[in-house]
Amino acid sequence: MHFIFNGLFFIAGVIWGDWKRWRLYYPTILFLICVDLLKNFLFYNYSMWTYEETFFGETILQNHTFINLMIMVIVYPATVLIYLGRFPQKRQNQFFWILFWIVTYWVVEYVNLNYLNLINHYKGWNMKWSFLFLIVMFVMLKIHHKNPLLAWALSILFILFLWNVFDISVEILK
């Protein structure tokens, strides 16, 4: 099923992504991938969620790492190219554009969690936390596009906030 979801994002990215100005969005694509890699590294022994492949492709997508890497390579660039490439100029439309992306990602996660068993939550993570996480993620993408250093600083603060709220021990680090 992850192949299907990734395929749909790939097609959407090809159709609606701003490929003419991809170099403009490249740093933000790398930012999103780096933050996800950092999350995977820091929480390697304390996963808040993991991806599973339950339908087909188990021989290729054997575990969370392979699925997450595929998402980083396909879904993240497609998302950024569409999200930033079509970001509205009018402020009231910006709010609805950000909300559209938050809700889209949230619904995909909800379906994957509750109907397709493609994701599992652990250690107190739930759909409410995912909603907050998505708000921060999509706001950070826009901020990063305009002010990368501010986005990095705010992202580190958010990571520390989550670390504190979920009472994660430093001993979980390798």
Image: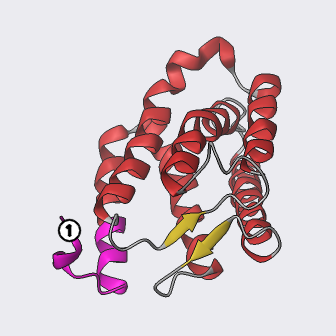
Element marked by disc 1:
loop
Q: Which residue in the rendered view is the most extreme toward the front?
A: 59
Specify whether residue 163 is painted magenta. yes
The colour scheme applied to this rendered structure is secondary structure
**Mark 1 packing: few (<14 Cα in 10 Å), some, or many (20+)?**
few
Q: Could you tell me which quadrant the C terminus lies in?
A: bottom left
For badge 1, the amino acid type reads: Leu
Magenta segment main secondary structure: helix
Residue positioned 69% across, 60% down in the render: 102
Quadrant in which residue 118 is drawn: bottom right
x and y percentages locating residue 104 in the rendered image? 77, 57
Query: Left or right of 81: which side holds 151?
Result: left
x and y percentages locating residue 163 in the rendered image? 31, 76
Q: Depth check: give the residue in front, 69 or 103.
A: 69
Residue positioned 38% across, 39% down in the render: 147
Q: Is residue 99 above or below residue 78?
A: below
x and y percentages locating residue 117 in the rendered image? 73, 70
Residue positioned 64% across, 40% down in the render: 75
Residue marked by disc 1: 173
Q: Which residues are magenta?
A: 158-174
x and y percentages locating residue 115 in the rendered image? 83, 73
Q: Depth check: give the residue in front, 72 or 59.
A: 59
Specify whether residue 150 is painted magenta. no
Q: Is residue 127 above or below residue 174?
A: below
Q: Is residue 135 above or below residue 78?
A: below
Residue positioned 77% across, 47% down in the render: 5
